[in-house]
Image: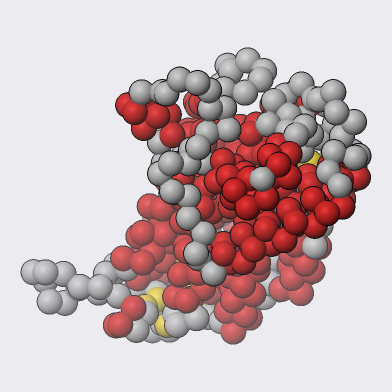
Amino acid sequence: MKLWEKEYKVEDVIETFTVGNDRELDIVLAKYDVQGSLAHAKMLEHIGILNREELASIEAILNELLQEIDTGQFEIESEFEDVHSKVEFVLTKKLGEAGKKIHTGRSRNDQILVDMHLFLKEEINSIKALTKVLFDELIQLSEKYKDEILPGYTHLQVAMPSSFGLWFGAYAESLVEDIHVLNAAYKVVDQNPLGSGAGYGSSFPLDRTMTTALLGFSTLKYNSVAAQMNRGKSEKVTAYGLATLGGTLSKMAMDVCLYMSQNFGFISFPDELTTGSSIMPHKKNPDVFELIRAKCNKIQALPYELSLITNNLPSGYHRDYQLLKESLLPAIDGLKSCLEMAVFMFRQIIVKKDFLHDPKYDYMYSVEEVNKEVQNGLPFRDAYKKVGKNISAGNYKPQRKIKHTHEGSIGNLCSEEIKLKFKKAFEE
């Protein structure tokens, strides 16, 4: 069944190519399509298109469909083009004339917009919740290991003293910016497009304010053309949110891969959380974090991919938009799995404490020596030269006692302030 079916039959090859994998992807959106239909039916009764009995019967069938979706029994068979046609077919088959009225005043264009907006709202909140779990774990680790020194690097050269507390806390605070970007994406999708129809409104006296309230949107996407132009934009801005968070996870995963290697040896994980080599019996590979890095790097390409699909399209609907789901839905699942695995792994991380005796780490205390000379009255540039000459002459002896007190330093992680910052962003 097609909602646009006419007296002629489309060639099978055309149908196969144009439908693509919409049926599989639309299973994910089915719940939201039914929710949109419930709100639309209530609004149609409110403006006199449906009577109370018709509304009651439509609501009953739609609630049955929601139950089927919830239990995994809902299917979109091959005779249906998409979820919209399947839902309307069920209503028409069971209710006859009343079921045929459900499409009054709407188009598949605003249906898919509603579905995507509702879906993205829920998924963004789900990703935020998983991010909070990771944030809490990182902050806890930051406090637990705040006194454990870790070499800091610039240009991949040993640079200055850092700490595990500073390292864990850095990624925790980085997640705050990622939440801000996700919040921005949420604001874009938290607008009701229902009633924009094919992009140019309707001659029916639709009550779009009513459906906005029924569907839990904070506002209405007022202009019908603007509502349709949100197709592509809403997916792309969500992709930026995913990519920003993916960038944090990818960088973090790279650090873990480096720090696990024998050349660094700062951290490890239980054997059962690593993988081995088919030829080298000594190997304990960080495959989980390598895959997090790769998956998140792939996600960082998503905004560009969606931009290329939608760039330079004129206003109005175009079938190009169908392809957005193929990239966005798997990316959302992939990012959620990366967040879950990161938390799982960090809960079992082993922080090592016996590596600082290696002479190569002696030079990370050189700035401490410079600062000590400055505190004793020597101008900074002179102190810098003095310590540099001692290093060149082989007279440098590191003083490993460190006292950092300013906000955000080794000795003052500001964990409570970071937690408050995250809380404010999370609750926006």
Can the viewer see residue 114?
no
Which residue does the image show at 12% across and 76% down from the upper left? Answer: 281
Q: Is residue 212 left or right of residue 34?
A: right
Number of callouts: 0
Left or right of 210 in this view: 421: left
Furthest-left residue in this view: 279
Q: Nearer the viewer, residue 156 or 95?
A: 95
Compared to 355, does 428 lie above or below?
above
Q: Give the percent coordinates (x, y) of residue 80.
A: 48, 41
> Which residue appears at 90% of the width and 31% of the height?
205
238 left or right of 330?
Answer: right
- What is the quadrant of the C terminus in the image? bottom right
What is the quadrant of residue 351 in the picture?
A: bottom left
74 lies above or below 275: above
Q: Kindly identify the residue that appears in the image at 16 percent across and 77 percent down.
A: 282
Question: Which of these two is toward me, 215 or 288?
Answer: 215
Where, by quadrant of the figure, is residue 110 drawn? top right
Is residue 356 shown left or right of residue 193? Answer: left
Q: Residue at x 32, y 68 (%)?
A: 286
Query: Which percent across, then down, holds residue 65?
Result: 61, 59
Q: Position of residue 32 (x, y in %)?
A: 65, 52
What's the image's color scheme?
A: secondary structure
